Image (cartoon, coloured by chain):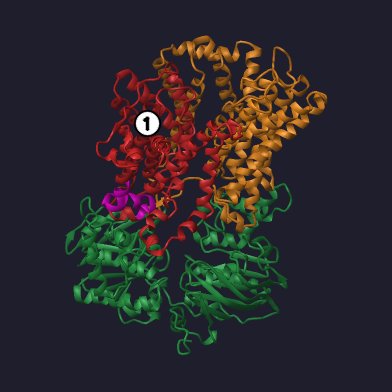
Amino acid sequence: MTPELLNILNSIVFSATPLVIAGIGETITERAGVVNLSLDGSLALSAMVGFATALVTGNFLFGMIAAMAVGAAIALIIALAGIELRQDQVAIGFVLTLLCADLAQFLGQDYTGQSSRSLPQTPIPLLSEIPILGAIFFDHPVIVYFSYFLIIMTWYWLFHTRPGLELRAIGERPQAAFARGADVNRMRYVYTVLGGALVGLAGAAYTLAIRPGWSNPPSMRGDGWIALAIVIFGGWHPFRVVLGAYLFAGLRALSSTIQRDPSIEIPLALLNGLPWLLMIGTLLLVSTGALERLLNTLPRPVQRSLRSVLRSNPPAALGTRFDPD
Amino acid sequence: MSKAVQRIGFALVPVLISLLITALIIVIAGADPLAVFQSVLEGAFRSTSAFGGVVNFWIPLALCSMGLIVTFTAGLWNIGVEGQMVMGAIAASGVARSLGESLPNEALIPLEILAAMIGGGGWALIVGILKTRLGVHEIFGGVALNALANVYAIYLISGPWTPPEGGSAQSTSPFPTAALYQRASGDFPVSLLGLGIALAAILLVALALRGTRWGLHLKATGKNAKSALLLGVPTVQSALTAFMVCGALAGIAGSYRALLTYGSLRPFISGGIGFLALLVVLVAASRPVWTTLIALIFAVILGGSTRLRVALQLDQSLAGVLQGTVVLLVLLANGLRQRLAEPRRPRKEAPRATVERQRSVIID
Amino acid sequence: MNIELKHIHKRFGAVLANDDISLTFSAGRIVGVLGENGAGKSTLMKILSGYQRPDSGLILLDGQPAAYHSPLDAIAHGVGMLQQDPLDIAPFTVLENFTYGRPGGLSMGRQAARKALFEIARRYGFTLDPETPISHLSIGQRQQLEIARLLSLGVKTLILDEPTTGISAEQKTILFQSLRALARDDGMSILLVSHKLEDVIALCDEVVVLRGGRFVGGATMPATPEQLVGLMFGQPLPPEPRPAAQLGKPVVQLDHVTIRTPRLTIQDFSLTLRAGEVVGLAGLDHSGQELVLRACVGLARPSHGTLTIGGRDLTHKPYRDFVAAGAAFGAAGRIEEGLIAGLTTTEHIALTATTGALVNWANARTITEAQLKQYDVRGTPASPVETLSGGNQQRLLMALMPQSPVLMALEQPTRGLDVESARWIWAQLLERRAHGTAILFLSPDLDELIAYSDRIFVFFAGRFCEVPDVRAATIDQLGRLIGGDFTPEGR
């Protein structure tokens, strides 16, 4: 494997990190039955606040905490509106998308064009020595390693713990969870806010690591929608969500390689449309059942053990309200 | 507290709080809120020509809003309205570029409007087909097609439609005057034709939803597509026509931006007006009269804030902050009011999940 | 466990669902709780099992007052309820579903749960594979799982809400055996909520009867169905006079129709319906009868065979062509499929009555007023349909159907209706039939099938057979067929 290819793969993993974190955050939220549609705005606002905080305090950790607080606060508004005030989660989420994006632009006007240090590269001793894999996965800033931890943790939590069972039940059939003693709405608050905090962290990942600095319009605009699509493509399963995020990042890397290649004559401007075509394409894979059919060609035993990964149905109670008497 | 006072309170308090929050944000940004509000009001009302600028925002905003009332009635979230504006602008620009030198204004404008309607309506139809035939939710289809429309516009501006004098990728060359909507006067730079079209759209949409079978079909489809189908409503056709009508109106709105506001095709020509129209319709709960009024208020904010950068070195995204906060708080206040109105709602069966989002399953 | 209910009151808006009910259930007994729809039996059982709270009244368990606030609380007190649609979580496996709700910490405790499930399943003859997802189970298996779960949580009183709806004869046998064992061997109290008298007679030691939210009496078994009906309705119902059939020429023809779905195949089904004929379709839920019925109006697509209505070949045609050919369809879930919540009665009438581009609202209102009156719908032209009661919704649906269609295909035309409303609906249907409309309907109510059908087809897992002589058919015979016993003895 050439060093060049290794470099590309390394950068794919690196640049996919915010999508991974935001996608997992949204997966957690939606698993609990709540839709946080505000991702595109949340990412922008938390990215801006995270960047500004880190710049002012000179401390990355403070920046990330501030970003997470912003994401959590936005999610809290959605939970409050959806659960307490019985408003349409999609409508509130959409309003917040626009509001937060404008807020980020307005509050960020003094930081526009500023850049700063980015999170330092911290190769993991020993692991980064592994041939190929080490160079791809273990030579990154800390936040990338956190995304690995998050993936495993979310998967384990969802499918191997009692609270994870409850989380899935709440989004699937809240009445049944209630009958088993779950405080459905309280847990929905918890997971919505938790998911929002992760979205906030993803925002900070952009401005503190992936593309350090703040610009206007912010560089991550649009990625919130892509993260939402990745959750659908990912069938609400952390592993497939990650796969989707890497796929997107990979195709982006590919298109930027194409851009650099003078022998290929595709107008630069049109290449920017690729992620969006890809987004529709991945959603079509799921909605037309093509993905399902593809996965069904796997051998039976594999299918059985991968059952939870393979299903593509949204949580049955997604976007609905639960009123215990 | 009487009912009326309560109603007014629930409408006014969120607006006042939004103003306070916005003031706070302005303070955080290091400016004087009073100066900002004054500047916005002056920006909108200081002269007929300034108010003309407001009307020039209102016309496309009202057109998009009326279109969105149609799609919301059919239970559809036409977030793709932005892209439909852009495609309308592109289509109208195409006509303006190719025939602008050879036809008189009276012949060009109808052609351009027709092209804009086809461009916007066709772009909306794609979202509709993705939704009804291929199961891709209209929010995702719309977001993607918005981006693609903008990508296409930028491609045209930086590629085939680059001004011969050399492109900065900022805009095409100005269109010939014959291809533009005619302004009423230098003092009032509004196209009366555009104004007329917007007013006609308001009237027609309001009447169509209230008094035609098509309107009833949309409503039935939006509330319960499954039942509607069984009661003989062609649900897919309803959804697709709703998309196309909205897209066509958005297309006209886009043509107004290209052929009046700028006189050329620019990147991101919609200026966020389509998204703003979604907010307007949400806050007006799809009622035509309220939609028209709120669109006007939002146009004032939008028009007034164009001067912010020059006057106070503030980003004009402040307009969006104020509008977004108002809409958010009004929606929250609605929820609060409903919550307070039903102290202990009797329920026949507990516990059960209530479907709250507008379901828009289109079945065939 | 001995249970005493004292002066239970529960009000929903204007309706007094439970009006001063006092009852005692003793340990080791199986008690049937009877009453027609709206009698208040479900509410009472939900109060007893913690799903709802009484407005006033007292629950005593073994003499001790018990105040609980949730179903889990009630289970901790030893009272568990099996809902008609078992409260399980479809994507979960059997084991996950069994595990979820058991006390414990962070870990799922799979091994302990697996062992507990295995023990209970073996003891009561349940067949439950721990790794099967719930969505692949039959209702009967889901009930078994839910019972196993409640038992493993230490429940000493088991309440079952209509447990024999939608389960096979074999599963019913297993269910009844295990319930008897639980009462006899473990001293459990079993409360069976049911409107199926044959089940109550077969299983219960005693019955209590509710009517209009009040406790109106009880009986110790054995009792005859007539006695029980007398208690439920105040006086025994006279048997329905069986209307004579006036058959005309064939109007609907299914010729060697095959319908395939991922779960079910109906092979080679043929049926000719004559004008004025009533054909009933019987079977457990999802045995194929729904597909056949929907195929007759173009809502399910046959892979083979042909379908004609009034001589027009409609194979593979969409629903609207069937409607144009004179078919009318009534779905089981009225407010989900049929009526549109949020629209008024007038808007519904306008939807079906308007033909031009414009809606004449004044005219629609006049028609609506007339229709509401004619069909005895208690509501106004401005009433949103979701505010109507179930019976009124069904009557409105009748009003929306064409006056004299060639075919009416109806799913559970009297679902959830009280006896009076059900009879009214059938009077309407029979009147249309007298004018030559052919009626195809499905129902889980065997009495209804026998009372109104000229012919009956029974479905089981996609297989089907015709009941040879409907006039001589009995509930027992139909029950055997529905359970899948298509042998000559079964028929």
Residue at image point 62% right, 66% down: C297
The chain coloured green in the image: C
Look at the image and say whether residue C395 sits in the magenta stretch.
Answer: no
Q: Give the range drawn in magenta.
A: A154-175
What is the count of numbered marks? Answer: 1
**From this viewpoint, which residue is outermost toward the front?**
A2
Compared with A203, C242 (above or below) is below
**Along the line of sight, which residue is nearer the eye, C380 or C51?**
C51
Determine if residue C376 is in view. no
Left or right, residue A242 beside residue B64: left
Q: Colour of chain A?
A: red
Determine if residue C201 is in view. yes
The image quadrant of residue C159 is bottom left
Residue at image point 20% right, 57% down: C66
Relative image position of residue B263 (x, y in whole percent)? 69, 21
Compared with A323, B207 (above or below) is above
Q: Which amino acid does label 1 sit on?
A: Ala
Mark 1 Cα-neighbour bin, 10 Å: few <14, some 14–19, many ≥20: many
Relative image position of residue B306 (x, y in whole percent)? 56, 16
To which chain does the residue with label 1 belong?
A
Residue highlighted by disc 1: A205
**Along the line of sight, which residue is nearer the eye, A80 or C417?**
A80
Residue at image point 24% right, 36% down: A125
Relative image position of residue C119 (x, y in whole percent)? 22, 70
The image quadrant of residue B156 is top right
